[in-house]
Amino acid sequence: MSRQAVVDLLAASVVYQEGSLVGFNKPPNLAITGKDDLCLTSLLSAVQRRLSLAQELHIVKASSKEHSGLVLLSTCHQTTQSIENAYARRDGKKTALTSYCAVTVGIPEPAMGEISVALTQQSLGEQTMVVPVLNPSAGNFERKKVKKAVTRYRVLDAANGCALVQLQPLTTFQNLLQVHLTLKLCTVLGDHVYSSRVGRVLGLPVLFSVDLAVPRTQVSKVRVNVG
């Protein structure tokens, strides 16, 4: 896809624009930063012109490269700082500032609850992945090797082995929601990074070791019968 085509796509994906804030749905596989000419930071000035904004855009919050999701931009640094301060004050408190909805493969049980499992980053092969730490020591937290992580969830609807789930992160960590859902033997539809951690043995969902769960395309083939 050409640079202009990506800019047009982002402009067409705006879901919120008021005052200094702009929100749009980011397509998957669009990097946020980097040397790539098609990463979001390199496209901001073009998006600004496309939206006829007088001030420069900068990123407030964004989903990672592999995932689609809301990207929040701002033309006001003071507004950005206020939002970042709100997230910083929230960390460690049971207050949700944001809510997400995800379609999951698998249905979380029970239908409502909290997932409180610490997380850390670990090198697996050539990739750095987020992994759960089920029994962290006090020293792990003191040395900041692991971080407390809490997700509140609620199943809104379910059918045919899938669910629509509301997710509220009570802490911040990269890929928090995707990793926490795997602990409920569920994966986010479209998650090609962590979905391989949940598989089936004799028809029952099981959690695979993170060392064995190589990231892969979640769905490689879909068969559609018509008629």
Image: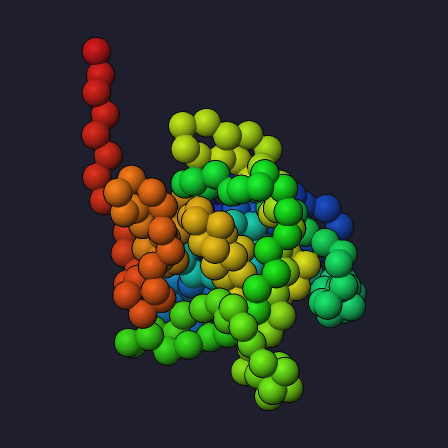
The residue lying at 52 percent from left, 57 percent from top is 180
The x and y percentages for residue 161 are 41, 33
* Residue 86 in the image: above or below residue 138: above
Q: Residue at point 73% right, 68% down?
A: 92
Work out whether residue 188 or residue 19 is closer to the camera in this orientation and state it: 188
Instruction: Indicate the quadrant where residue 94 lies.
Output: bottom right
| Residue 97 falls in image quadrant | bottom right
Query: Does any portion of residue 224 appear in the rendered image?
Result: yes
Q: Where is residue 221 in the image (x, y as percent from the top left)?
A: 21, 39
* Residue in the image at 47% along x and 59% along y: 179
Q: Quadrant of the image for the C terminus? A: top left
Please identify the quarter of the rendering in which residue 219 is found: top left
* Applied colour scheme: rainbow
Locate residue 182, reporting x and y percent. 45, 54
Q: Horizontal and vertical percent for residue 39?
A: 43, 64
For residue 69, side relative to residue 5 (left or right): right
- Tell me: 187 left or right of 201: right
48 or 87: nearer the viewer? 87
| Residue 140 higher or lower than 189, as above or below | below
149 over 67 or under it: above or below: below
Front residue of this view, candidates 209 and 64: 209
Q: Which residue lies furthest to the top in this view?
A: 227
Picture layout, residue 227 above or below residue 192: above
Please indicate, yes or no, whether residue 63 appears anywhere in the rendered image: no
Q: Which residue is drawn at 53% across and 35% down?
A: 164
* Tally of numbered tags: 0
